[in-house]
Amino acid sequence: MARTKANPKRNPDHDKKPARVKKDGTTCKKRRWKPGTVAMREIKLFQRGKRATDLLIPRTRFDKLINEIVQKQAQDMSSQVSQVSPKARRALRTAGEGLLTELFKECRDLVRLRGAQTVDVKDMAFAWGKMQQVQATLRAGA
């Protein structure tokens, strides 16, 4: 008795979108960009395009995080503070992005020193520890 597969073969073209059709009735191939082209386009957009001055962290998600932290603090310390003003939220978001930007810059420098091309977990941990040491030194000096 011959063995058969339990699952029947599916048509590989079944899940694909139909190709675009030109006015003359011929079909177009789907555009395939070289690796890195789209990434470079996005980098240029963020550096000098419309989004150059926008913050990168989405506002609603960051607001949810702030609300969660405030609720937890209110339960732990039985404090009366239950709201954060919009200006304070914007300041927290700006400071958070600045901190993350510095962290990624430190990681990039560490990766270059290692001679690697990708950021590793140990790079992040080392950069975070280094940033905390600098902050502690600045606090002690002030």
Image: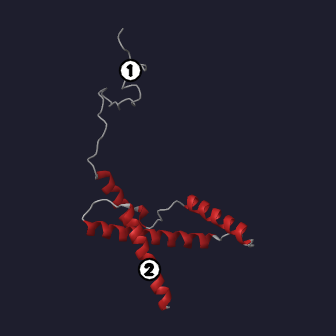
Residue 40 quadrant = bottom left
Where is residue 73 shown, x and y percent of the image? 67, 69
Q: Where's the N terminus, which quadrant?
A: top left
Residue located farthest toward the left when viewing the structure as drawn: 115
10 Å crowding of disc 1: few (<14), some (14-19), many (20+):
few
**Residue position marked by numbered label 2 in the rendering:** 133
Task: Say what secondary structure mark 2 lies in.
Answer: helix
Residue 60 higher or lower than 33, as above or below = below
Q: Kindly identify the amino acid type of the residue bearing the numbered disc 2.
A: Gln
Residue 82 visible to an observer of this rendering: no
Q: Mark 1 to mark 2: distance in Å?
A: 59 Å
Task: Say what secondary structure mark 1 lies in.
Answer: loop
Where is residue 123 shown, x and y percent of the image? 36, 66
Name the residue rendered at 59%, 69% in the picture: 89
Residue 86 quadrant = bottom right
Residue 40 visible to an observer of this rendering: yes
**Residue position marked by numbered label 1 in the rendering:** 9
Q: Is residue 85 left or right of residue 125?
A: right
Q: Kindly identify the amino acid type of the residue bearing the numbered disc 1.
A: Lys
Residue 49 quadrant = bottom left
Where is residue 52 shown, x and y percent of the image? 41, 65
**Quick one: label 1 or label 2, which is nearer the N terminus?**
1
Residue 90 higher or lower than 44, as above or below = below
Front-lying residue, 43 or 124: 124
Name the residue rendered at 32%, 51% in the picture: 38
Name the residue rendered at 67%, 65% in the picture: 72
Where is residue 69 shown, x and y percent of the image? 63, 65
